[in-house]
Amino acid sequence: MALVLLPGLANLIEDISEEKKLPTQVVESALREALLKGYERYRRTLYLGISEDPFEEDYFSNFDVALDVEEEGYRVLASKIIVEEVESEDHQIAIDEVRQVAEDAQIGDTVVLDVTPEKDDFGRMAAATTKQVLAQKLRDQQRRMIQEEFADLEDPVLTARVIRFERQSVIMAVSSGLGRPEVEAELPRRGPQLFVSRANAGLVVYLFENEVPEIQEGSVRIVAVSREANPPSRSVGPRTKVAVDSVEREVDPVGACIGARGSRIQQVVNELRGEKIDVIRWSQDPGQYIANSLSPAKVEAVRLVDPEGQHAHVLVPPDQLSLAIGREGQNVRLAARLTGWKIDIKNSTEYDQEAEDAKVAELIAMRQEEEALQAEAEARLMAEQAARAEEDARLRELYPLPEDEEEYGSAEEADQDEAGQDEAG
């Protein structure tokens, strides 16, 4: 078959490469895949209105497309196995036919043949498929390259600048490192993109690491961060709680993070545009940790009413109740996220321990009942799976599958070989 000409192929590849910021070999690979899909579509359309599509999904797996950029064209190639009698013309070729051009050909060898259709036969539907697949492949390659370039930079803080706003999207230029070109990231629309965020708690950690030498040195560590950079209501401002601890006893972790006259934490607050930040002392004692997490509220007592379910009652004086809860519940919500405990704020003057314990006991009983039901369901499922596996094994003994017979035959041969070797010894 003659080469199917694609005038301007070289320029087309170069233009796409430059426009999409992709290497030419990547563009060529995408074009080859698209042309192959187009050929597959062409073959399938030959049966439209005549009979059902006779091709399985992987029928064309032995086909490929060869691009000739210099001659500006392509060929469709098929790898065929040499056989005595042909059953599938797309996958096999008769040895008599091959030996007319290659006398030393053997059955089982593979030959590559040119099966390119005439360009006139390569219809509109096939051409449209080629165009669609090429566009999709190029998008996939763009997405893959961006992901590969920034894969190692997930979570670290990068320098980015806003280029422009488009409707609900923000176009930003993000650099993955010094001396490397910027990549445009579009948020939050679909397509090749990067998700960049100033709301991530990791940004707070990064800023404290830069401002507090003790964190850099390792004498102070950030244990947990709970952040609400985008509160659910406009009446509530952004807020963050940071739990810190010290490796060295003589170092005050909270004081180190706040700095002299608040100088260090003020730098972090300024970078976050006035976001409120509570730095609290982490503790191994859950009660103390929970009390600290509700800062700046003063706590009278913490009752761990259900340690297994991580549920606590925090008793505060009446004048500290609203402060402990926070505006629209923000303070207690952040404290719960920080500690991992469910926290109920209670008025200490109205707290009825006996009644509250009765309520908690009911909740514990309900939780334990749910856990028991879940465990029972899991045990039942495991028993069913074990019984099914046992039944499958029994049926395979009665009615062996072909692969079982092959394995059994191989095992028998191995046993016979070992016996023969023993006799020879």
Image (cartoon, helix red, strand yellow):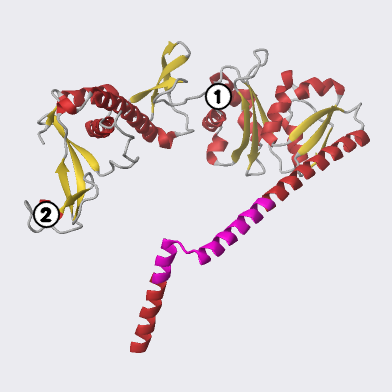
Q: Main secondary structure of the magenta part?
A: helix
| SS state under label 1 | loop
- Does 97 sit left or right of 413 as displayed? left
- Name which residue lies at 68% across and 52% down: 380
Residue 151 covered by magenta stretch:
no
Rendering coords of residue 100 (x, y %): 6, 52
| SS state under label 2 | helix
Give the residue pinned by disc 1. Answer: 199
Q: Is residue 95 visible?
A: yes
Q: Earlier in the sequence, mark 2 or mark 1?
A: 2
| Distance from Cα at disc 2 to Cα at disc 1 | 71 Å
- The kind of residue tagged 2 is Asp
Camera-near label (2 vs 1) is: 2
- Name which residue lies at 73% across and 22% down: 329
Closer to the camera in the image, 254 or 334: 334
Q: Is residue 208 above or below residue 167?
A: below
- Circle 2 packing at 10 Å, graded few (<14), some (14-19), many (20+), is some
- The kind of residue tagged 1 is Ala
Closer to the camera in the image, 44 or 208: 44
- Name which residue lies at 45% across and 20% down: 189
Rendering coords of residue 98 (x, y %): 11, 52
Residue 391 covered by magenta stretch:
yes
- Circle 1 packing at 10 Å, graded few (<14), some (14-19), many (20+), is some
Rendering coords of residue 27 (x, y %): 25, 30
Boundaries of the magenta span: 380-409
Mark identifier at residue 143 = none
Q: Is residue 177 visible?
A: no
Give the residue pinned by disc 2. Answer: 96
